[in-house]
Image (tube, rainbow, N blue to C red):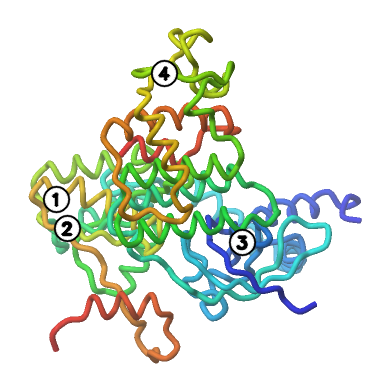
Amino acid sequence: MPPLISSAIILRHVDYGEADRIVTVLTPDHGRLKGFARGARRSRKRFGTALEPFAEVRLHWVPRPGGELVSLREAELVSLRTGLRRDLETLALAGYGCELTEALFDEAVGFAEAFGLLRAFLDHLDAAGASAGARLLMELRLLTLAGIVPHLQHCAECHGALPEGPVGFDAGRGGSLCPGCGGAAAGLRVDRLTLGSLGRLLQTPLERFADIRLSPRTLQEGGALLADALRGHLPKPLKSAAFLAGL
Amino acid sequence: MLDSIPSFARLVAELAKFPGVGTKTATRLAFYLLRQPDAAAAALATAIVDLKRNTRFCSVCFHITEQDPCPLCVDPARDGSLLCVVEEPQAVLAIERSRSFRGRYHVLHGALSPLDGIGPEELRIAPLLDRLKAGEISEVLVATNFTVEGDATALYLARLIQPLGIRTTRLAYGIPMGSELEYVDEATVQRAVQGRREL
């Protein structure tokens, strides 16, 4: 069987035995794949540096009937994104973006928009470095693509309008809550202006990260809101999130 | 089949636990041992037991050793102001083989990994800082691998060490000796161009 060729972003890899490597990648047409790269650590001819995390490659691979692991034959490097290694925060945020994408799109089903979003996120970090705004945009857009973004600009329970000023937010109940639905007792308080900003961000192009400025309040309240929303949808806490928090 | 020869099956099972050794290779090795004289098999068994019994990690640099502190830490001919930080003991052996470094070492026993959640507390970084604060060291050469994990570790160490006023350097990137540019990957060429120097 001739190999299939896909664009792919390397999410991570683990060494196997003396010379092999198991690589997890995201592709636009086949979703998340796990592949076995025989001899990848010993021979630099077929893979070179192309299997490093965050790299974008043209991947030559062959499905293996009945097995989860595909066979990786060759990887042509498109971009290694060496700018991600400029500082620890950028490196850690790139890792977080990859882990979060994998956690929310953990199936071998094509999702070109998620691939495009991760590519744009990594390219932005590669060029501009880490920022709280890039993280917030990535989280918000991934939640949107996964179809689990919380109700922001109206009450999640009665669908009524929200009052001006701070309102309650509880991701477990669907999102923003008006006073009549018990918003005052919700764990998070988020200003209506922040919810409006997040709503407007949902209208921006999915792959645009540059030149979007967010106020400190939007970053702080929006970050807490998205963390609350993600918590309910992730099967376990992300290792890279704990690493980022420890920096 | 092997179940009828329990001692043979047990050896195959133990050998197959080695990295890179599958059942086929383990079986081949077991047949090889079977054909050796008793003394050869006993020597192998003794070598394994002695390795486990006599070696430990040096309490200063955390390299493997039979005496504590290790010979590298007590050798008066080595430069005590120069410290090389590596991920694993194998890296010490690689650098020693090159005969290019005459300072002392510190083995971290791992590397930071954002994706695996391996943080600084899981590495031998606290004892490294204790050594640096003792005041003898004037330069730290960070010789971690050129992987995402190695780069993360180097960036983290630089952040800790530079405020102490200690010169912090890293191994140079470059084109391997004897290789032709045409066949070197673009990332290595890119780093080599960035790290060019005067002739």
Of B113 and B36, nearer the camera is B113
Q: Residue furthest front?
A: A161
| Chain hosting mark 3 | A
Is circle 3 on the same chain as circle 1? Answer: no
In front: label 3 or label 2: 3
In front: label 3 or label 1: 3
Please name the residue that numbered disc 4 is placed on. A188
Please name the residue that numbered disc 2 is placed on. B168
Please name the residue that numbered disc 1 is placed on. B162
In front: label 1 or label 4: 4
| Separation of residues labelled 4 and 2 (CA atoms) | 44 Å
The answer, for residue B19, to whether it is visible in the render is yes
Q: Is residue A7 above or below residue A69?
A: below
| Chain hosting mark 1 | B
Of B18 and A109, nearer the camera is A109
Q: Amino acid at mark 1?
A: Gln
Q: Is residue A238 left or right of residue B78?
A: right
Q: Position of residue A84 (x, y in %)?
A: 35, 59
Q: Describe the element under mark 2 as helix, strand or loop.
A: strand
| Chain hosting mark 4 | A
Circles 1 and 4, Cβ within 8 Å, touching? The answer is no
Q: Position of residue A64 (x, y in %)?
A: 78, 64
Q: Describe the element under mark 4 as helix, strand or loop.
A: strand
